[in-house]
Image (tube, rainbow, N blue to C red):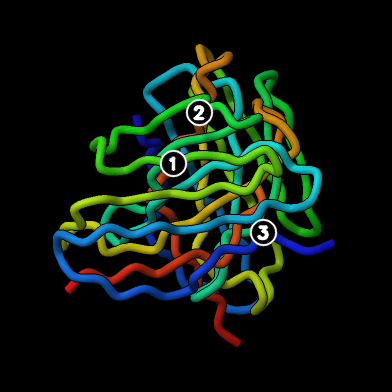
């Protein structure tokens, strides 16, 4: 089942912070985050595995709350280069050999000067 | 290190035709996944291949098929094309199959059906 991302779109000014959420109705084993700029391929940001860990990538970090089946992506002091569509991809806890990454519909982030 | 290469970049076909898309993964990567991306549905999983075997398949009709060769290169075939098949088709490769494997995407093949 496709995870739900919120918000669908967000507009920021350079230097502002943003949070993007990814929620699933199923128990999750992992959450992947990717960013896709217009006309380009999605680029891997980070993976969070079951265990509630938090990871960071430059000024972008994420958390994974397995009890709530939710992950949040935190963008702090946003830069113009952060603009793009952010996708979360989730793997159910029952994945195993039937690993299948299901992506949300994406959150369009626009950072203005 | 060369990235994931997809060919062709653009294709225009008419309804009823068939099409084959190609994907060359990053050297050393053995897993290849295919996705369909449309504005309304986002990224939808088509199938994954690992060591020439299909490991998983998404909810697409049998008109969508694929295969992987011994050098890990993969092809995707769509037969009897429909207008709704117009989309960006993305291929992603990873070292192996599993939860901790980041996927590296190619630039995609944009397929337009007239």
> Label 3 belongs to which residue?
B4
Q: Quadrant of residue B109?
A: bottom left
Q: Residue furthest bottom?
A: A113
Does the image show residue A15?
A: no
Of callouts 3 and 1, the N-terminal one: 3
Count residues near mark 1 (Cα–Cα under 10 Å), then give few for <14, some for 14-19, many for 20+. Answer: many
Q: Where is residue B30 in the image (x, y as percent from the top left)?
A: 70, 37
Residue found at x 60% / y 61%: B106
Q: Position of residue B100 (x, y in %)?
A: 71, 30
How far apart marks 2 and 3 lie (CA) works out to 19 Å
Q: Position of residue B59 (x, y in %)?
A: 29, 33
> Label 1 belongs to which residue?
B66
Of callouts 2 and 3, the N-terminal one: 3
* Element type at mark 2: strand
The front one of A51 and A98 is A98
> Label 2 belongs to which residue?
B54
Circles 2 and 1 in contact, beta carbons < 8 Å = yes
The front one of A96 and B81 is B81
Of callouts 2 and 1, the N-terminal one: 2
The front one of B91 and A10 is B91
Q: Position of residue B66 (x, y in %)?
A: 44, 41
Q: Which residue lies furthest to the right in this view?
A: B1
Residue A65 - label:
none
Q: Quadrant of residue B85?
A: bottom left
The subunit carrying tag 3 is: B
């Amino acid at each position: 089942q496709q995870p739900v991302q919120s918000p669908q779109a967000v507009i920021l000014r350079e230097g502002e912070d943003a949070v993007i959420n990814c929620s699933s109705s199923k128990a999750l084993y992992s959450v992947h985050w990717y960013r896709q700029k217009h006309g380009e391929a999605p680029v891997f940001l980070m993976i969070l595995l079951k265990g509630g860990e938090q990871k960071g990538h430059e000024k972008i970090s994420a958390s994974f709350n397995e009890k709530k089946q939710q992950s949040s992506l935190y963008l702090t002091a946003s830069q113009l280069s952060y603009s793009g569509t952010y996708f979360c991809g989730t793997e159910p806890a029952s994945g195993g050999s039937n690993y299948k990454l299901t992506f949300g519909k994406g959150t369009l982030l626009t950072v203005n000067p | 290190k060369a990235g994931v290469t997809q060919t062709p970049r653009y294709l225009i076909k008419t309804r009823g035709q068939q099409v084959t898309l190609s994907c060359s993964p990053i050297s050393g990567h053995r897993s290849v996944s295919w996705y369909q991306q449309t504005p309304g549905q986002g990224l939808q999983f088509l199938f994954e291949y690992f060591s020439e075997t299909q490991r998983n398949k998404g909810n697409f009709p049998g008109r969508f098929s694929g295969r992987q060769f011994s050098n890990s290169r993969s092809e995707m075939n769509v037969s009897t094309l429909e207008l709704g098949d117009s989309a960006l088709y993305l291929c992603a490769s990873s070292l192996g199959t599993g939860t901790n494997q980041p996927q590296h995407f190619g630039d995609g093949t944009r397929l337009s059906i007239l």
